[in-house]
Every structure is written in structure tokens, then in C-alpha cells.
Image: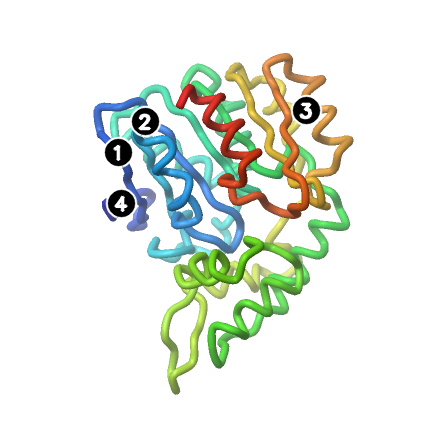
Amino acid sequence: MTPASRFITIDGLKLHYLEFGDAASPPIVCIHGLTRSAHDFDALAPHLVRRYRVLALDVRGRGDSAWGPPDRYNIATYADDLGAMLDQLGIRRVSLIGTSMGGRISILYAGRNPERVERLVLNDIGPALNPEASAQINQWVASAPLDFANLEEVKAHYRAVQFGPGSDEDFAAMLKWLIKPAAGGRLTWKMDPAIRKPPPGTSTVLPIGFWEEYEKIAAPILIVRGALSTVLMPETAARMCQVSSKAKLVEVPGVGHAPSLVEPESLAAIREFFGC
């Protein structure tokens, strides 16, 4: 399924999103992880479009969205962008699917706007981050090469921290949306370098918790956890279910951070959650 590629101007920036399905159907907005893109949901969207309009956003500074001021690369700004997008598109109530960083954006938005969120899927992320995992992510992002000789080098960079699909075919399909041609036939990131190199004294991934916002979420919550993940720890996932009586946890065996959402276990849970 080929999505429509669209742009919207928010906070002076031209942001890109993909749209699947009928515009008259109930909306689901999908939000990707720290270094990824809207195309992370290309495989999932076809399973939802029979009943839903699926929108996948390139968060500012990533994919085909414009780059913004470095000091505005933070979860609060991204949540504001999401709200502005919904307002401009005339969407009053929405379901959200957020992977990793996208889940933190979704938690913040849903906690601050509980009346506007219908359902929420959190993919391998919670209100609190494992400090060791967040430190590893910061080191990995900051140490990323500026460019690469070929796709194999990009793949090796991601494989070093096991962030990505299991099969090489799925991995290559994901990576092609994250890079662009550079001088001398090399490849470089589409992502703004300022995301890799934040202002002095700060980190790309900040150890900010969102338990207060999570507790205010009124919508049913589906938590998808990779059984091998070190980002969403088992004790955090358990607490999330204790805090919200509407939360349900499904674990994906043999998968780390983060599930693709089309593994049999993920897909079965999501289809049941959305009635697809």
C-alpha cells in the first residue's frame, strides 16, 4: 500500500506525514522513535485501514520534515507539534501509536489532553526510562558517524545496539528512509545533526519521567514490550498496569527494542485492541 505524502506547517516548520486509508474514518496517528521515520509504520498501516485513517508523522528534524532550532528538540515541543497537527487537520479525538520516543510524546499529549485521546498504544516505552538504557542510547546517537560508505555500514551501526527489525530485508527497508546521498557517493543522515549533538550540557534523551501525565490518561492503553528489551523494564511495565486499570501488557518473545508491531503477537494484540 502506497501512502499519500503530505506536509503541514507548524511553528514555522514544514512537517511531513504519511496518510493511509479513508479520510472519513476514525484517525490514528503513529509517531516513531528517536532516530527513525514515519515509514516505520508502513507495514502496520495496511492492517488498520479497513476501519481507520492512519497518519504517520515525521517528527521535526527527522525524515522529510524540516529541521528546527536545536533547543526545541524535546518531548514537550514534539507534543505541542502533535496537538497543532490535530488542530489544523480538524481532528478532535484521536488514537495514538507511539514507538519509543513516540510513546513518550504520546504519554505527554494524552496526559495533558485526556479528553482528546481515544486509544493509546505504547511500543516498548513507559513513563520512566531505564537509566542504563538511556545512557547507552545517548552514547550511541552521539557517536554516530556523519556519513557512511554504504548501506552495510549504516546497518552495522544500528545492529551494534540491536535497534531494528530482525531480518536483513526488513532492516534494509527501514534504513532507506533514514539516509540520503552525500558527497563522493557516500550516505548521510536525513536527521538534523543537532539531534546527535545537542547543546552543551544536555543529552538527546533526557531522564525525565512522565508518571504524573500517565496517571491522567483516560484512554485504554495497550503496552507492547519486547521481551528482550532493556528500555522498558518488566517492573516499569508492571507498574504501568497497576497505575492504569485500562492498561494491558503484551510481550513479544525474542525481540528487543523495539517491536516492529507486525510480529504475530504484536499484530494480534493491536488488531484486537482496535477491533480490526
Q: CA distance from mark 2 to mark 1?
A: 7 Å
Q: The residue tagged with tag 1: helix, strand or loop?
A: loop
Residue matched to label 3: 240
Q: Amino acid at mark 3?
A: Met
Q: Is residue 108 visible?
A: no
Residue matched to label 4: 3
Residue matched to label 2: 52
Asked if the residue at tag 4 contacts the one at tag 1, i.e. Cβ–Cβ closer than 8 Å, the answer is no
Q: Amino acid at mark 1?
A: Gly
Asked if the residue at tag 1 contacts the one at tag 2, i.e. Cβ–Cβ closer than 8 Å, the answer is yes
Query: Which mark, residue 21?
Result: 1
Expressed as whole percent of the image width and height from the top left, the position of residue 96 reads 44, 30
Mark 2 Cα within 10 Å, few/some/many (few <14, many 20+)? many
Q: Amino acid at mark 2?
A: Tyr
Q: Is residue 111 above or below residue 36?
A: above
Q: In the visual, does 1 lie left or right of 158?
A: left
Q: Is residue 95 visible?
A: yes
Upstream in the sequence, badge 4 or badge 2?
4
Q: Which residue is rendered at x = 69% and y = 35% of the image?
A: 128
Upstream in the sequence, badge 2 or badge 1?
1
Query: Which mark, residue 199?
Result: none
Mark 1 Cα within 10 Å, few/some/many (few <14, many 20+)? many
Q: Which residue is rendered at x = 32% and y = 50% of the image?
A: 13
Observer-nearest of 226 and 29: 226
Q: In the visual, does 254 lie left or right of 171?
A: right
